[in-house]
Image: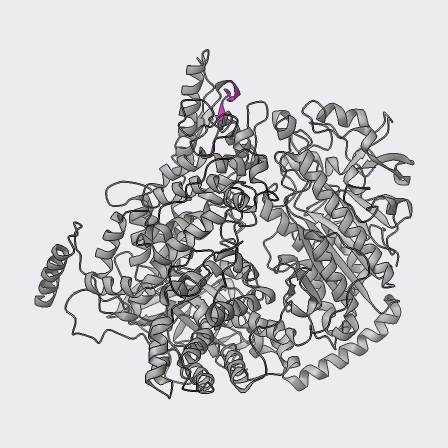
Amino acid sequence: MKQNRREFLVKSAGALTMTALASQARHFGLISALAQTRKSRTEAFVPSDYRALVCIFLSGGNDGNNTIVPNHNDANVSNYAAYSAARATQGLALQQSALLPVAVPRIGGLTYGLHPGFGTVAGGVNPGLHPLWATGKLAAVTNIGTLVTPTTRAQYQARSVPLPFNLFSHNDQVNQHQTCRADAVTLTGWGGRISDKITVIDNPNRLVPTISSVGGGPLFTIGETTQPLALSPAPTPLSNVLSLTGYNNTPVTNARFDALNAGMNLDGQQELIAASNNYHRQALDISRSLNNNSEVTVTFPNNDLGNQLKQVARMIKTRAVLGVTRQIFFCTLGGFDTHTAQINNQLALFAQVSQGMRAFYDEMTAQGLGDKVTQFTMSDFSRTFNPGGSGVNVGSDHAWANHSFIVGDSVIGGDFYGVNTSNGTPFPTLVQNGPDDADSGTNARGRWIPTTAVDQYAATLAKWFGLPPADTAYVFPNLGNFATTDLGFMLP
Amino acid sequence: MNSRLSRFSLILLLISIFSFTGRAESDPDPDSPAPVLLGQRTRGTVLAVSGDGFLKGVPGRGETVFWPGPRNFMTLFVSNLDLLDGEGANSLRVYLYQKSGRTFELESAGLEPVEKNIFALRVRLADRDGFRGQPLADGESIIYLTWRGLVSNALKINLGREGGTIAVPDFLKNVPRAAGSADGRNLVGYRWSGDRTRFLEQATFGPSADADNRIRRIGLRTWLAEQFEAPSPAIPYPVIPQMPVTPPSNCSLTTNPVCYRDRYTMQPLQQWFFKEAFYGSDQLRQRTAWALGQIWVTSGVTVQQSSHLIAYHKILANRAFGNYRDLMADVTLNPAMGYYLDMVTSTKTNPNENYPREILQLFTIGLFRLNQDGTLQRDAQNNPVPTYDQSVVNNFSKVFTGWTYCNSAECPNAVPGIPNYVDPMKLIPENHDLTAKTLLQYPNAVNPTIPACADCTTPEQTAAYADASLNMALDNIFYHPNLPPFISRNLIQQLVTSDPSPAYVQRVADVFVNNGQNQRGDLKAVIRAILLDPEARGSVKTAPRYGKLREPVQLVTNLGRLFPARSWNGQTETDGGVASYMTKMGQTAFYPPTVFNYYPPEYIVPQTTLNAPEFQLLNTTSAIGRTNFLYTLIFEGLAPNATDSLRGTALDLGEAQSFAAADATGNQLLDYLNTKMMHGTLSAEHRAAVLTAVQAVAPTDPALRAKTAVYLLGASSQYQVQR
């Protein structure tokens, strides 16, 4: 039971739903019909021929409170002194002189500061992300997090609105960021669901799935009908990512390959075997397509995230051969669970994030795709404003609302975005037991309640990417709970 | 009766021969009958009636159309069951396969005998979890059930309307029947060879010829008793000195990479582990310790030195046959865990929430209230019920304050200036929180609160209060009703099958609650219950969802025991330096990426409703990685090199090679491998495909023929799923 690639892709798309899928002939009919739909829609909504979203997931829960810091003395909103008062004693406050200033038109032009890791760093290969603020290619969505519906402090404490389940738990909050379903356990991610809707219409000639992940198959990338391509990072050449060793086109190895292939098409009577075979078949099939190398021209940092983004850049450079016009990528960097030793660890991690994302931005510019590829960050949650421990051990614990970054030439950068908090700005009031703290009394450690939902952030990106409006409810079923569905940080 | 007596006396004889002091027990036939779902006479449709009442007998004719929905029930009729005392509805799992290609699991709601050998099974016409929606009223669907890992016949059922022909899915065609027990020649020991192999896959790091022979002679129960007493470890733990946090100049990565590797990476632990897995005689203890290590996760990603995790691993191995409560206490005060989840820096002024959160969520009770059979409790709105909230985490945080490395002279392994990771953590009394705490609340809760300290005026009084509080808090967790089903299900997933029936979980959880001597948490009894359960045992399991994907570590250890692992040149034993060759498979031993382990127990395979944790590790990259690793291991061997392994590793395929040499057709080779690797389940199609590839190799090269066949079977999903 050998199958050609196209038949395979259809099967892989459905995993165990193969028997229910259309015949090959019907499938081709479907593609052409949908392609026509897309053509007219393309003229209406999407002015370009290629777009990609690149998610950089900061795994472990990045402390947003040390990512963007007030760098002003305005007494009407939380200023540097307020920040420092809460964090300096235990050694978690960043020096004001070290902050990288960014002007924020949204808050009357007040200056805020990025963590110094986002600037020039020792051993760096580029100036980092900070300069992109001034050039308008870097934006931040502030006080964002998982929400089912808009939630005030009183509502949170009274439990009078549906709340995200298992707040402050890593895996649940990771999943809710990746699924945009804070109200339910669900088995698909929003990247995967976008892919479900646009794959057939935008990538009818695809040789690889619309969505790829460097390292594993996280929930973000899983759709109802689509599965991600899992890539290993650079320095592995793209052509070696999925290459099978031990075959040299002799009769003996050809016979061995046929038997290997046959085994991967024998599902026995077993669903687990069928599920395992599904990955093996997908890998074998795609390995035939990933056989050329397009090397990047920009220098990437030789570290975990740098090598992931480098592999993504190579994939994008190969897009014409791979027959894709819309792609979603997922990268992840771990280590942000800084219960202790945060000062040194977060600096090293931010240096890696900033250097890698900047190299990727520069590479996209070099490929002529600066306005066609958008990078964005997410994380499990932010961390408590109130530090844990002190001195070299100082860290912070699991919290809620955080700040996210978006990078690219289609970003309307140089500003904060998101729904205002109770202080009339999109930046939280940095006071424990204050108006934005979830808890009261001795439990109040500065876990800010989000004013902007991940759903709004994701939907803004999806709209730019070209998700048809009719499919928004499929991808973001809770989006209707929020007044603003486009946060405005992307050009059309 | 006679044969049973003679078997028993021969076991006694064998006991004296092997000077074994345990008590011998006989083993029953492991094979359960295959359940039969009663059908109507016509067109292969199921015999069923709607409504939620039970009938007095089996109706002559059933209804033809049923409506799916959470309030709708129907009654099916099942025969050919051989139920244990207390084995009820939750032992039967009813599946509905629809035209969408989706499989739904209907909730079994009640079971009653109606006639001789026939039971009425009441089911709710809705998927229990509904993660992938609910069954549709779209006409003809397929219904079948499983019991103890065996699938029934598949029948048709009309939902909403008649018609709309559905094809029987591949996984229900040509279901192999359970093998039965034909061989009556052996009067002692354990005669079911397929079940022996399956048992060794579950209870050890892989079947070896020696272990198989031993079980054939003494049987499963006696083998278990023997393993419970086996000396451990078989291979001594590496002795690695504790080092300063900053590598000294004579042991840095640049000045002395071998020193750095041995002391500042997990390499010695990895090497020891693989040697112990390949060669050790205390297999059950180490297999259990590995399973516990997948629950109580620490990782070389964060923990710095091999000496630290060796001390931690010793706790897991030491407590593998002990009491779960002692394991909880030992791990809580272990410095590697203390460092990994930050208890070493948690003080009353800055209580850290990391360890308290994870001990509750991952190591003991989980996030949601469970029934004793592991299924979720639901509230009136059908939502899961949380076991605790943030304030409970905060309160446990306060209990766990004040302990840190013991660097005083009273701790034998303390080295001046170096944090002590070998002895348990020690309390600094002034850092312990003295306020009142409110802990987990549950019916008849043990220690739901801890009062504030009334008389903590001296360090001694504070220390006594802290120790008492710690024990009260651990008891509060230990006696939570979630703990037995949560841990039992997780251990079953580790050893036997990814998605056990609720009845199986309940049988094991009952033993967890009470081992028969009114002891809760006896892991020996729990392991025994898991491995001897009728859902674990049997020569062949036919249920479409039975079994588990072998994680890379166990894929390697199983092959290394089936075909004894040797050094690369075959001259001696391997030094166990295997882990660094395995990275492309996505699992590096002792380096799980986070406290959530390599794979979470609740993982669902994308696009399916299959709960199969190890699939978290499988993707396009690691799938190719598995096949390529097997190519290297089998065809070339893992070549020695100065960094990873001085001896390298290869498999001894001598036996396979002799079968290849004896028969130019290759059939003997395939027969041998079918028994050895597949316990007789190799399909005719798969066998033919492999045989063709074997025959493409010249018969004058039996070594290459053997390698080809072992590689092709090993790389197949049919082998990589442990069934």
Which residue is farthest top? B457
A165 in magenta: no
Left or right of residue B571: residue A258: right
Instruction: Please state the horizontal and vertical placement of residue A476, each as a whole percent of the image.
Output: 71, 57
- Looking at the image, can residue A460 be seen? no
Left or right of residue B155: residue A378: right
Of B13 and B373, nearer the camera is B13
User: On the rendered image, what quadrant is the C terminus of chain B found in?
Assistant: bottom left
User: What segment carries the magenta color?
Assistant: B430-441
Instruction: Please state the horizontal and vertical placement of residue B663, each as a whole percent of the image.
Output: 34, 86
Instruction: Please state the horizontal and vertical placement of residue A224, each as a whole percent of the image.
Output: 63, 66
Left or right of residue A144: residue B92: left
* Quadrant in which residue B315 is drawn: top left
User: On the rendered image, what quadrant is the N terminus of chain B found in?
Assistant: bottom left
* Quadrant in which residue B619 is drawn: bottom right
* Quadrant in which residue B623 is drawn: bottom right
* Whether residue A268 is situated above or below residue A120 in the rendered picture: below
* Whether residue A78 is situated above or below residue B442 in the rendered picture: above
Of B562 and A450, nearer the camera is B562
Q: What residue is shown at x 66% (from left), y 63% (from top)?
A: A236
